[in-house]
Image: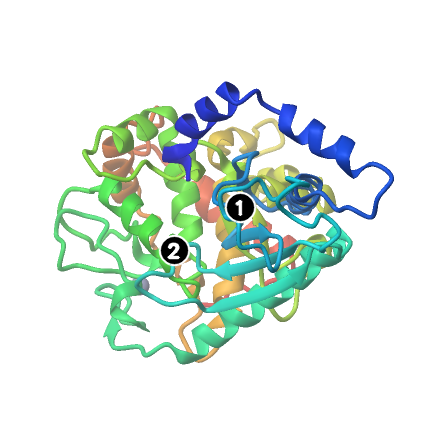
């Protein structure tokens, strides 16, 4: 959708922007007419308020409004309409008293994998109720997809079993495919290729509703460490697709949330949320996380009262720390028969591996020192501990 956005916006401005909607609204006044433009706007806004990354065009195409909300694709149209060239609010070509209807599908691209979820919802459903329904439906669909997975391969580092397509190769050694916990393990060999890894993560994200939750944590770390330089490298990679928006905007990075039990901090959220919203929720519930980090570092380093462990916290990576804690907790609940993914804490944030990867990202961070490794390892323990998750491995 992003690729076509500029073209569509050009068409829209040539057509006079909102002028059409205003005319339709005048037609609608005093009748029982329901305008699809209003329904679409209100629902997109409700998803956004619920913390879901959203993207929409602001005008209909082929008689339908489309949008993305997290992992869900939405189409809004007027049932019974056969005039696909007409604006769905054109009173002369549609009966505006017919309630429009949403069709929500997931994954976002289902050409190769099929639709794991299809749900129709009447357009007059109150938007917060609609968001709850879609959230519950996509969580159920993901659960069903995960239950169907066949673990026909194993991580080259930890040996945990996964579907082969869910293991990705972080380095130029393409045959060494690993799970999300082992991406920065010291036993990996070859030069890191984070551009390919990012596009491989995007491929899973768009096509696989059952993708392992932990890949979002890896994406968060690449995005936080790489910043704009990494986004430029992704754009220059010569890949036909544009990089997904989450590489440049953490509010767009979807984090699946634990499906069964949750700490109070995440209570108000649905099946998942954008990373920025997840960070806000965790920090609002636990405003002392940095203080806890400082205390734990000081204890480990046996600092005396005049020294301060806070200096070891690399603030730029903090959203990634929270992403790791939450995404790995989700993965643990979703794969109960497997090794808990917390084994990332047993030397799988290895300074040399992190430094090698950060260099290839174009990161401004020097991971050769211990600050980056401390931030991730200690931060993950602190955040998971605050959320009452037991990081056994
Ligand atoms: Zn592994």
Compared with 126, 368 (above or below) is above
Compared with 115, 338 (above or below) is below
Q: Is residue 248 visible?
A: yes
The residue that disc 1 covers is 63
The residue that disc 2 covers is 109
Closer to the camera in the image, 177 or 342: 177
Label 2, residues with CA under 10 Å away: few <14, some 14-19, many ≥20: many
Closer to the camera in the image, 25 or 369: 25
The x and y percentages for residue 357 are 26, 39
Q: Where does the C terminus fall, quadrant-wise?
A: bottom left
Secondary element type, mark 2: loop
Q: Is residue 276 left or right of residue 288?
A: left
The x and y percentages for residue 90 are 64, 39
The reply to whether the C-beta atoms of the residues labelled 1 and 2 are less than 8 Å apart is no
Distance between the alpha carbons at the discs numbered 1 and 2: 20 Å
Secondary element type, mark 1: loop
Q: Is residue 384 left or right of residue 174?
A: right
């Amino acid at each position: 959708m992003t690729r076509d956005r500029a073209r569509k916006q050009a068409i829209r401005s040539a057509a006079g922007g909102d002028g059409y909607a205003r005319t339709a609204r005048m037609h609608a006044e005093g009748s029982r007419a329901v305008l699809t433009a209003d329904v679409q706007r209100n629902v997109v806004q409700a998803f956004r308020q619920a913390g879901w990354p959203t993207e929409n065009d602001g005008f209909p195409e082929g008689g339908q409004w489309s949008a993305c909300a997290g992992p869900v694709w939405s189409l809004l149209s007027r049932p019974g309409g056969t005039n696909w060239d007409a604006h769905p609010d054109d009173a002369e070509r549609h009966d505006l008293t017919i309630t429009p209807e949403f069709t929500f599908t997931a994954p976002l691209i289902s050409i190769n994998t099929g639709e794991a979820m299809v749900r129709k919802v009447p357009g007059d459903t109150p938007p917060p109720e609609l968001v709850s329904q879609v959230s519950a439906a996509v969580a159920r669909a993901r659960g069903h997809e995960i239950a169907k997975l066949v673990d026909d391969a194993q991580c080259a580092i930890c040996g945990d079993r996964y579907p082969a397509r869910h293991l990705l190769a972080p380095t130029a050694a393409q045959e060494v495919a690993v799970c999300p916990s082992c991406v920065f393990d010291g036993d990996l060999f070859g030069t890191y290729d984070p551009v390919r890894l990012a596009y491989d993560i995007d491929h899973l994200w768009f096509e696989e509703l059952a993708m392992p939750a932990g890949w979002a944590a890896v994406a968060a770390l690449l995005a936080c460490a790489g910043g704009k330089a990494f986004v430029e490298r992704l754009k220059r990679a010569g890949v036909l697709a544009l990089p997904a928006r989450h590489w440049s905007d953490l509010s767009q990075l979807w984090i699946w949330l634990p499906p069964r039990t949750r700490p109070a901090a995440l209570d108000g959220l649905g099946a998942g949320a954008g990373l920025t919203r997840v960070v806000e929720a965790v920090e609002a519930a636990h405003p002392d996380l940095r203080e806890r980090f400082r205390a734990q570092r000081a204890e480990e380093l046996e600092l005396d009262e005049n020294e301060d462990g806070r200096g070891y916290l690399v603030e730029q990576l903090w959203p990634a720390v929270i992403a790791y804690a939450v995404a790995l907790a989700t993965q643990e609940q979703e794969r109960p028969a497997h090794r808990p993914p917390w084994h990332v804490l047993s030397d799988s944030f290895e300074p040399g591996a992190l430094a090698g990867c950060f260099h290839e990202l174009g990161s401004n961070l020097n991971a050769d020192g211990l600050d980056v490794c401390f931030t991730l390892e200690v931060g993950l323990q602190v955040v998971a501990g605050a959320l009452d998750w037991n990081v056994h491995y």
